[in-house]
Each structure stands twice: as C-alpha cells, then as structure tokens.
Amino acid sequence: MKNRYFGSRQFYKMTLGVAVPIMIQNGITNFVGLLDNIMVGQVGTEQMSGIAIVNQLLLVFNLAIFGAISGAGIFTAQYYGSKDEEGVRNTFRFKLYICVGITVLGIAIFSLFGEDLIRMYLKGEGNGLSIEDALRYGKQYMLVMFAGLLPFAIEGAYSGTLRECGETVVSMKAGVIAVFVNLFLNWMLIFGNLGMPELGVRGAAIATVISRYVQVIIVIVWTHRHSEKMPFIKGAYRTMAIPRGLVKQIIVKGTPLTINEVLWSSGMAVLNQCYSLRGLDAVAAINIASTISNLFNVVFVAFGDAIAIVVGQLLGAGKFEEAKDTDRKLITFSVVLCIGLGAVMFILSPLFPMLYNTTDGVKTLATRYMRVSALFMPVWAFMHASYFTLRAGGNTIVTFLFDSVYLWCLSYPIAYVISRFTSLPLITMYFCVQSLDLIKCLVGFILVKKGVWLNNIVDKST
C-alpha cells in the first residue's frame, strides 16, 4: 500500500525539483499580488473593488493564453520526451502565432465591451456613488493594462516551452524579479513616493505592465543565450512555417483545451457575478479572500504543472506503467499536502482581512469565505491533478467535458438560481456551489483509474 501511493526519497526529489520552482514563482507572484491588493485597499474599497472586477475579467484572457499554450504544450512535452527537437521548435512557433492572435482579439473585446462587463458586477446593494466610483476606477485600470497583454502572452509561450523541456528555474527567477519590480513601482506610483506622481489605480496598472516587460525580456534573453541547453530556439525564427499535419493535430487536440480555459474562466467570472449580487461588500470580500486563497493554492497548482510535465514526458517516451505509477503518487502527495495547508488556512483566516483598510462587515465576510475555501482545498487538489492527468495524454475532449462543461451545466445554473430566487447569504451560496465539486472528484477518480489518458500522441508509428 505504501509503495503504491507513496514514492521513494529520490522520487520526491525529482518531482519537487519540477514543482518547487513553479511553486515559488507562483507563491511570490501571489504574495506580491496580496501586497498590491493591500496597497490599493489602503486608498479605498471602491478602488480595490474596481481593480478586482477588472482582474476577474482579465483572468479570462490569461487563461485563454494558458489554454492555447497548453494545447501545443502537450505535444512539446511529448516531443521533448522522444528527443525530437524539430517537433519542439514547431510547437513553439505555433504558440507565438496563437498568442498574438488571442491578444489582438482580447484587446478588441475589452475595448468594445469593457464598461458593460464591469457593470455586470455592480448590480447588488450599494449606494450609487460608490458603484459609479468602482466603475470609474475599473475603467482606468483596464485601459492601462492593455499595454501588458502582449508581453504576458509572449512570456507564456517562452516559459511554457522551457518548463515542458524540464527548465523551470529561469521562469521562476524572472517571475521573482518581476514581482519585486512591481512591488517597488506600486509603492512609488500608487502613493506618489520618491517624487513620483500619486496615480492610485493607474499607478498600480503601470507598475504591473512594466514588470511584465521586465519578465519577458529576462526569459527571452536567457533562452537565446543558452541555445545549447534549449536547442529548440536555434533557427526558431529562421522560418515561421509549421508542418500542416502538426498544425492540424494541435488544433484538433488543443482547441478543446483553449475553449475549455476560456469557458472555465468566463464561468468563474459569471459565478462571481452571481455572488456580487449580494452587494459591493461581497465583491470586496471575495477579492480579499481570493487573493489570500491563491497564496495557499500554489501547491496544487504547481503539482498540476508537474504532472503535465513529468507524466507527459513519460508518455512521450512510451513508459506507460511508469507514467501511471508516477501520476498516482503525485496525486496522493498533492492531496495530503493540501489537507495540511487547508487546516493552516482555516486557523489563520481571521488574521488576513485585518491587513485591509475596509469595513468590519467586509472583513467578516472575507474570513468566512476563506474558511469555506480551506475546507475544499483537498477536493480542489484532487480535481486539479485529475484534470492535468487527462490533459497529459491528450484527452482534451474529456477534459473539456470534465472541466468547463461541468461548470456551465451544473455549478453556474445552481449559483444563478440561488442568487436570484433565494435570499441565502453569500457564504451559504458559496458552500452549496463548491459542494458540487465532490461529484466532479468522483468522475475524475473513475477516468484516471480507467487509464483513458495513457496515450503517446507523438509516436509517428501509430
């Protein structure tokens, strides 16, 4: 039993070598996001709420980029596992094309419909002045953030390829530098320190945009200077042509993944819109709670990436039994860690909202919201690991059904009905919606156990 679900010291050393740099990068990013959140929160609740709404909308763009990159990344990891450098190079080119396309589309949508999208979250209780202020601050923040969408996308294409080729430290270092640049510029531009103008929410957006350019420059320069370690970059721009057969394969396998990320993130956006109907206090509380929760969630997020990379490489090398054993042990490790982290988060939940300059009602709501999140953390760990297991083998239609279709067909309708036809408070509504994930866990367990994901999608002989 122990050998089946728990690995050797060498096993954990190997997997942590992949997961920890991702964990550190995401952890520091979320920690600085917390500090950024607190800084804006010191200016006012309306400013914090406006930024929170825009960031929820931008999450749809971010995850569309992630989904598009991940669709090609399934092939990258397996090509790397089979030592096919040209295959890696072609998937990298595909990522660049799709990132530019999504960025252009994203800017067009947010330019045309940005104000209407923000207003969707400002329909609950609250006086007209505070609601209009939140809208105004949100529009200010969004306008500046447009300039940071392209560097975010290009950095994702580079870093995703590096990770799938086993290099996770560079992206971590670039992310660490970028978030500290962001933090320092926030301090200067939000509050007007060191002789800089006091720009408030605009300052927060400018700091984020500049930090994204810093991050993408570091990753690009390192990659091109270390072509001996990352041979895919040699001749990557000599031609931008991609074999039609590969493009077709990536589109067939990757499109459901991209659509899934867009639908999942937009689904989360409309879920939060349902919660926002409980008032502007609910928007502020969810923002605080989500920012704190993301600090703890980095563990299962990192292990999801580790599964995609390690298991994907094993599948590409045709080592199916080793992939199955590795996956089982990684899922177990992720869930066990999140049981402990969830307990810590539950205990510490009342302390975090005290860092914010907001009302006692918002602080109480945020604490209760975090405690519900803490209870469900092991559930999310298992769901996340199951999703990335199915994705590693190229089962993107299954992941599409498992993830976004489930959210839109079950979770969202329940949230819609509760928010509009009952008077249940925010926390009860949130608990009811999250409880539906237990069904999703059961489905994930069955799919993973059946081994429907044990596929080599880059084997030319099949």
Image: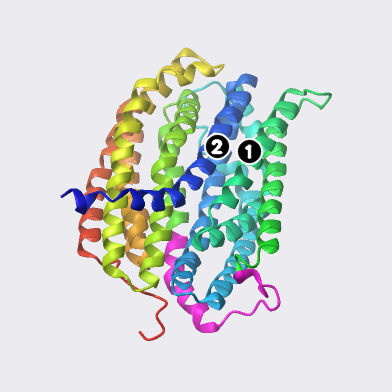
At a point 29% along the width and 32% down the height, the residue shown is: 375
Tell me whether the residue at label 2 lies in contact with that at label 1, contact meaning CB atoms closer than 8 angstroms: yes
At a point 69% along the width and 43% down the height, the residue shown is: 209
User: Residue 366 location in percent, x, y?
Assistant: 43, 23
User: Residue 150 location in percent, x, y?
Assistant: 67, 55
At a point 49% along the width and 79% down the height, the residue shown is: 248
Q: Which of 242 and 134 is in front in this view?
A: 242
Report the quarter where the C terminus lies: bottom left
Q: Residue furthest right?
A: 195
In this rendering, position of residue 209 left or right of residue 342: right
Q: Is residue 88 found inside the magenta-colored segment of the image? A: no
**Kind of element beneath mark 2:** helix
Type of amino acid at the residue the image marks with label 2: Ile
Q: Which mark identifies residue 28?
A: 2
The reply to whether residue 221 is in sight is: yes
User: Label 1: few (<14), some or many (≥20) within 10 Å?
Assistant: many
User: Residue 245 location in percent, x, y?
Assistant: 50, 83
Chief SS of the magenta region: helix
At a point 32% along the width and 70% down the height, the residue shown is: 319
**Kind of element beneath mark 1:** helix
Type of amino acid at the residue the image marks with label 1: Val
Question: Label 1, on which residue?
Answer: 179
Numbered range of the magenta stretch: 231-259
